[in-house]
Structure formats: structure tokens, C-alpha cells
Amino acid sequence: MAPIFSPDGKSLAFARQRERTRVEHPGPGELREFAEFTVSTWVVGLEGGSPRQLTPWRYGVERYPSAFSPNGDVLVVTRILNGGPPTAVALDLTGGAPKVITRNAAAVAFSPDGARIAYLGVGRKYRERGKGGGIATGRTVDLYVSRADGSRSLRLTHSPRDLETPPSWDPSGERLAFAQFKNDIGLSDPGGNAMFEVNANGTCRTQILSLDHATVFDPVWQSGPGRAAGRIAC
């Protein structure tokens, strides 16, 4: 699950899941069974060979691949402990120790030059009644940019009633594209969603698409020469 290509296109990072049934005896004559699982990150060459395990199995811990650095030396994974908020962790594929980049963060994307990252910052919990009468629960999500080591973080969106989807960098590294939808999406009366561009310094946010009764996720810039859009003027 969650496969991503390396920058040179020669390997693929992906996640594997294991599940087991756990039995507890909370009291005399009582028996409770529940499933628990673990997710580990692996990498495999596209020309064949055995997959290489990058993170250990540990029940209650999920580790999903998020992004390779442009030079392919670092793979950032999203780590979730016991269903809690996510943490972005950098795996040094040249042999160094794993390093936490930033907490309460998921869906890391490196800028084209590798100097910065964009990510989804996960905030406070919410519980709200949706338009269709259902209850929406979760955590607030906003878009952030920081240095590649997680320092000097800049919040680009402030939308407590909306959720952002994983960002994508323009090939110039000057702007980002992302989608946004309402907290009550998936209930009987979804709020629709929109797609935006914004400069990497948070200026000139521009809506480029809006849909009232449909959902789109995760816009992706097409890479390659001549496709850089540059800075948005406003």
C-alpha cells in the first residue's frame, strides 16, 4: 500500500501491514477479542530482487512512506503511534539514524531543490454536526512549509472548518497546489471542495477550481523542463 517512486525511477517504497487477533480477559467469565495491526515501510528495486525492510514491525505502530528527497538519500515516513497524531520521520538511506522532522505532521513533500518541505499539520480535535445531521469527528488540518529539517515552519492556511489534502510543488519551487474540503465530507450532505494554488511564502492564495457536489483530491504538478509556473503575482 501507499507506493511512491524514488527520484531516479529505479525503486519503489511501499507499506506492508500485519494483523493479529488479541484476546483479553477483563473479568471472570469475560472474553474480548480485537484486531491489532502494524504497518512497516519497505523498498524494492523495479528490476527485481527481494524487498528491503526499512522500519521494524511493532504492533500499534504504523509507518507509511511519504516522500523521497530529490537526491534519493532520504525517505520521509509518516509514523502513527496507537492511533494518535502523526509524526514525520526522516530515514537516512545511506545508513544514518532515523530523525524526527516535525510532530503532528503528515504527507510531507520536498521542494524541487530539496531545501524545504510542505506538509499537512494536524491540530486540535473537533466534533461537529454536519449539514446532513451526522457527526463529523477528527482533527483540524492545515498546510505548512518549513526547512527540510523541520525548522522555521510557516503556516499557509488557517481553516478550522476545512481540511487540506497533500500538497504538490510547482517545478519552480515557488508555489504549491492543494485541495480543500469541508469537515463533514462523506456525510449525507457533503460540503463540496475546491482546489487552490498558493505561493510557498503563503501569499496570493488563488482558487482554481470549485465543485459543489463532487470531490477531488491531491492535485499533482507535472514535472519536467518548461512546466515551471513560477511565483503567483497578486
Image: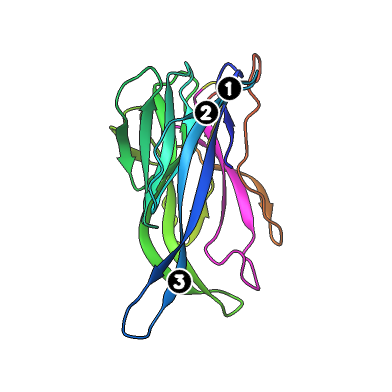
Residue 200: image quadrant is top left
> What span is in magenta?
173-202
Spatial CA span between label 1 and label 3: 39 Å
Residue 98: image quadrant is top left
Residue, disc 3: 33
Spatial CA span between label 2 and label 3: 33 Å
Q: Nearer the viewer, residue 172 or 90?
A: 90
Secondary structure, mark 3, is strand
Q: Evaluate whether residue 146 shows in this view.
A: no
Q: Residue at x 41, y 43 (%)?
A: 57
Q: Specify which label sits upstream in the sequence, 1 or 2.
A: 1
Callout 1–callout 2 Cβ contact below 8 Å: yes
Secondary structure, mark 1, is strand
Residue, disc 1: 11
> Is residue 80 shown left or right of residue 130?
left
Disc nearest the viewer among 2 and 3: 3
Is residue 16 placed above or below 148 in the rendered structure? Answer: below
Q: Nearer the viewer, residue 230 or 137?
A: 137
Residue 85 magenta-highlighted:
no
The picture places residue 99, in percent across and down from the top left corner, at 30, 31
> Is residue 135 shown left or right of residue 209?
left
Instruction: Rate crowding at label 3 as few (under 14), some (14 to 19) or many (20 or more) other CA atoms within 10 Å.
Output: few
Looking at the picture, which amino acid does disc 2 mark? Val
Q: Evaluate whether residue 213 shows in this view.
A: yes
Residue, disc 2: 43
